[in-house]
């Protein structure tokens, strides 16, 4: 039996589609009459404290999100494998966001928008894409997809990951020892790391101060991963004193971003409400229905979270 425990999304719609895809396999929602001990899979997003109560026959936890940082902090998380969402549609959507932000900053959007407001005709030619260095933190599923889509646009690319990665056309840096060297050659810093104790607060004033100062209107940060990666007071300070030229932020320390956050009023801070990439229902149903079918047929679970690493 599959149990859905999805908050803040249309759980009924996901349940209908999963039931249709898995029929005659039983699919239930909270509030339905069922024996919790018969639940083999639980599909979760923002689970409530009681989400896993009584699920004594659980074989796996299926996460609607690609990021599992919040799930890993659940006080009653059962000790069974946890599968995260890995999907070409999700990667495409995230890369759409990254490409949009990177090209916007590369073409000096902040500067020309201000000029237009002031009715000022002032020619300044943006650099060629090849003269702009984009540094991607996190070379996993999403980081690699973003790199593959930025590469044909001509940007100079570098990446930073925990273990060394080699992707053609991308200069790889790994581990704490190479972090500063990575930053020193980066004009636009894109964050696609998972949130773990090691990566918490990585987007801080000291980090910003190490970025290359070559791009007009730069350096720039683009955070599409988690709010816990950024120190917002440091971003405000860096945008105000010019340590950063601009920031594109999709995620925040507190979501929704509080009304009194100073970030709202900063001209060169581009805010979106955690919409960089959504787990699409059609591809999510196909992904998780396939996983349940395969697992019931004896195949191993894919994309299992390593709890030791935290991602
Ligand atoms: P992956 O697990 O595939 O990739 C993680 C990458 O980060 C890997 O390259 C890993 O290194 C690297 N990494 C992890 N820890 C460290 C560290 N301490 N130092 C340096 N590098 C590190 O994740 P995804 O690409 O699938 O997703 C990334 C994140 O994006 C998610 O965790 C989620 O928080 C966020 N997200 C945000 C969305 C949004 O709408 N804003 C939507 C979807 C996801 P290595 O390769 O060596 O393991
Ligand atoms: C995710 C997210 O982790 O939407 O998938 O943030």
Image: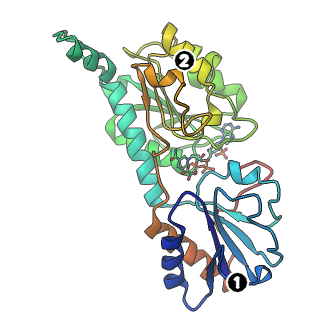
Residue at disc 1, secondary structure: loop
Asked if the residue at tag 2 contacts the one at tag 1, i.e. Cβ–Cβ closer than 8 Å, the answer is: no
Identified at 22% across, 11% down, the residue is 118
Q: Position of residue 222 (x, y in %)?
A: 48, 31
Identified at 63% across, 33% down, the residue is 229
User: Would residue 138 be found to the left or right of residue 119 on screen?
Assistant: right
Number of numbered markers: 2
User: Would residue 301 be found to the left or right of residue 244 on screen?
Assistant: right
The tag on residue 298 is: 1
Circle 2 sits on which residue?
A: 236
Q: Is residue 43 above or below residue 138?
A: below
Q: Position of residue 50 (x, y in %)?
A: 77, 63
Identified at 60% across, 75% down, the residue is 291
Q: Nearer the viewer, mark 1 or mark 2?
A: 2
Q: Nearer the viewer, residue 193 or 60?
A: 60
Q: Quadrant of residue 6?
A: bottom right
């Amino acid at each position: 039996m599959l149990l859905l425990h999805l908050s803040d999304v249309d759980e009924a719609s996901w349940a209908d589609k999963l039931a249709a895809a898995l029929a005659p396999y039983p699919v239930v929602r909270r509030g339905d009459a069922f024996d919790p001990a018969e639940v083999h899979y639980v599909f979760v997003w923002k689970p409530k404290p009681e989400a896993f109560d009584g699920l004594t026959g659980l074989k796996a936890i299926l996460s609607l999100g690609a990021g599992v940082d919040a799930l890993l902090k659940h006080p009653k998380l059962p000790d069974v494998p946890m599968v995260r969402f890995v999907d070409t549609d999700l990667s495409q959507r995230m890369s759409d966001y990254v490409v949009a932000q990177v090209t916007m900053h590369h073409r000096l959007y902040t500067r020309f928008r201000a000029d237009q407001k002031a009715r000022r005709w002032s020619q300044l030619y943006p650099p060629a894409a090849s003269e702009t260095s984009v540094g991607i933190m996190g070379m996993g599923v999403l980081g690699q997809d973003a790199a593959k889509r930025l590469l044909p646009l001509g940007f100079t690319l570098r990446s930073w990951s925990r273990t060394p990665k080699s992707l053609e056309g991308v200069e790889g840096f790994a581990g704490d020892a190479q972090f500063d060297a990575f930053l020193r050659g980066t004009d636009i810093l894109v964050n696609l790391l998972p949130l773990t104790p090691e990566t918490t607060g990585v987007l801080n004033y000291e980090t910003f101060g190490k970025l290359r100062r070559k791009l007009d209107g730069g350096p720039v940060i683009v955070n599409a991963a988690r709010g816990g990666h950024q120190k917002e007071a440091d971003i405000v300070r860096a945008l105000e004193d010019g340590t950063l030229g601009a920031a594109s932020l999709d995620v925040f320390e507190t979501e929704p971003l509080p009304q009194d956050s100073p970030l709202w009023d900063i001209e060169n801070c581009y805010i979106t409400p955690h919409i960089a990439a959504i787990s699409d229902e059609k591809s999510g149903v196909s992904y998780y229905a396939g996983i349940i079918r395969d697992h019931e047929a004896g195949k191993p679970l894919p994309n299992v979270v390593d709890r030791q690493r935290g991602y």
